[in-house]
Amino acid sequence: MQIRVLGCSGSIASGSRTTSFLLDDDVLIDAGTGVGDLSLEEMVQIDHILVTHSHLDHVLSIGLLADSVTRRRRAAMRPPIQVYALAATIAALRLHIFNGVIWPDFTRLPDTTHPVLAFQAIEVGQVLTLGERQVEVLPARHTVPAVGYAALGSQGAWVFTGDTGPNPALWARLASLPIAALVIETAFGDDERALAGISKHLCPSELRSELAQLNTPTDVYITHIKPGEVDAVMSEIGAQGSRHRIRALASGDLMQLP
């Protein structure tokens, strides 16, 4: 399996894209602004979208992608793109985005028999089978119902925490899961630790406490840092020292999972 980073920023600016990962060529994990860097042909190949939660920076490209690929997928008689999310997340998407006011309901377009999108409700602990790949739904703790994901490889898992504050349930699960790479958010510097707590994100000091729960040294990639704050946040993380191999994630990065 190959994971391509399309976007990993906490917001937008020139050169910054919000969260989205492409697993092989047909699975999106979140659908932030990074999806817009795919070609139309690459978008047409996407058959599955795994959503961590309902916040706009993680979902705004779902509807735009659907609009872009409708004609080509229908001409090729492709099935609906399966959108996997918690039931509460699906309800939020239906109510606030695919409502005919903010955006058309592509679960009913171009017609109810052959829609572009189909929602699939998931639960924490569920293992999704996507072709020959398996992806486990992990717990997350955020201001809205949220999950993370683990793409399960033969020699370890690629783990994405999603947006989450301190999360004991995650580490309880990861204790028995071999990890090849961990993608974890650190949205704020320690000078905004109070804001990180209110918004259920991590800051460097909280990250240190979270990573201390990993059993073995691991490749750790930091995501969701806001534009212009990457150097400051990574300096705070680096000053702590760690047995893990930590670096900032960047759009365009490729990760291979055996």
Image (cartoon, rainbow, N blue to C red):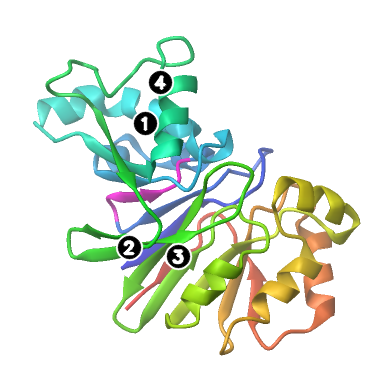
C-alpha gap between disc 3 and disc 4: 32 Å
Image quarter where the C terminus lies is bottom left
For mark 4, what is the residue? Answer: 98
Report the residue marked by disc 3: 254
Residue 175 — which label? Answer: none
Question: In front: mark 2 or mark 1?
Answer: 2
Mark nearer the N terminus (4 vs 1)? 1
Residue type highlighted by circle 4: Phe
Q: Are marks 3 and 4 in contact (CB under 8 Å)?
A: no
Report the Cα–Cα distance between label 2 and label 4.
Answer: 26 Å
Tell me if 160 is positioned left or right of 198 in this view.
Answer: left
Q: Nearer the viewer, mark 4 or mark 1?
A: 4
Front tag of 3 and 1:
1
- Classify residue 171 as left or right of residue 244: left
Outermost residue toward the right in this view: 191
Residue at the extreme top: 101
Compared to residue 40, the image places residue 46 above or below, namely below
Segment tinted magenta in the rendering: 25-31
Q: Nearer the viewer, residue 185 or 230?
A: 185
Q: Residue at x 40, y 20 (%)?
A: 98
- Disc 1 marks a residue whose amino acid type is Leu
Residue 65 is tagged as 1
